[in-house]
Image: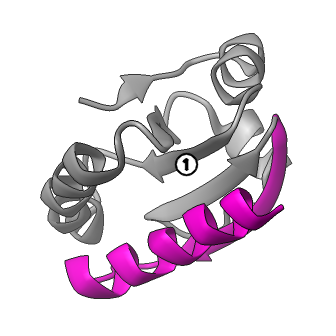
Amino acid sequence: MAQTVTTQVQIDEATADGLSVIDFWAPWCGPCKMMEPVLDQLEASYGEKIHFLKMNVDDHQEIAEQYKVMSIPSLVVFKNGKAVEKVSGYYPKEKLANYLQAKVTESELA
């Protein structure tokens, strides 16, 4: 289960080492609800290689703005504490798995 983060300090601590993905979502967002089981399944597959986090944008708009989250769902990828990429919108499981595998491979080669 993805760790819920609510402050910048929590984000800094949770993303400090290795790869992390923060799911910026809201409870009223239909695509976010569709994305949740996909992310849960991918976390089961990549849980040792990627740290999965989530943040409710309704409660933390200023942090979402800091990461230029303009639409949800948005996934912000962190590498060793630095936000390096963002993808927005619903992704089917296979497409998102391919994307995450590429990030893992890049990280392992670096």
Asked if the stretch drawn in magenta spans residue 102, the answer is yes
The image shows residue 53 at horizontal and vertical percentages of 46, 35
Count of numbered badges drawn on the protein? 1
Q: Give the range drawn in magenta.
A: 81-110
Residue 83, position in %: x, y?
A: 81, 51
On the image, the x and y values in percent for residue 71 come to: 56, 70
Residue at position x 50%, y 49% from top? 24
- Please, is residue 35 above or below residue 96 in the view? above
**Residue 67 place in picture, x, y as percent:** 78, 52
Question: Which residue is painted at 21% across and 54% down in the image?
Answer: 36
Queried whether the magenta region covers residue 30, the answer comes back as: no
Where 43 falls versus 31 (above or below)?
above
User: Considering the image in quadrants, where does the C terminus appear?
Assistant: bottom right
Q: Which colour scheme is used?
A: one colour
Q: Residue at x 74, y 36 (%)?
A: 63
Instruction: Decide which of 26, 79 is in the foreground and name it.
Output: 79
Q: Give the residue number, with chain letter if any, for mark 1.
A: 21
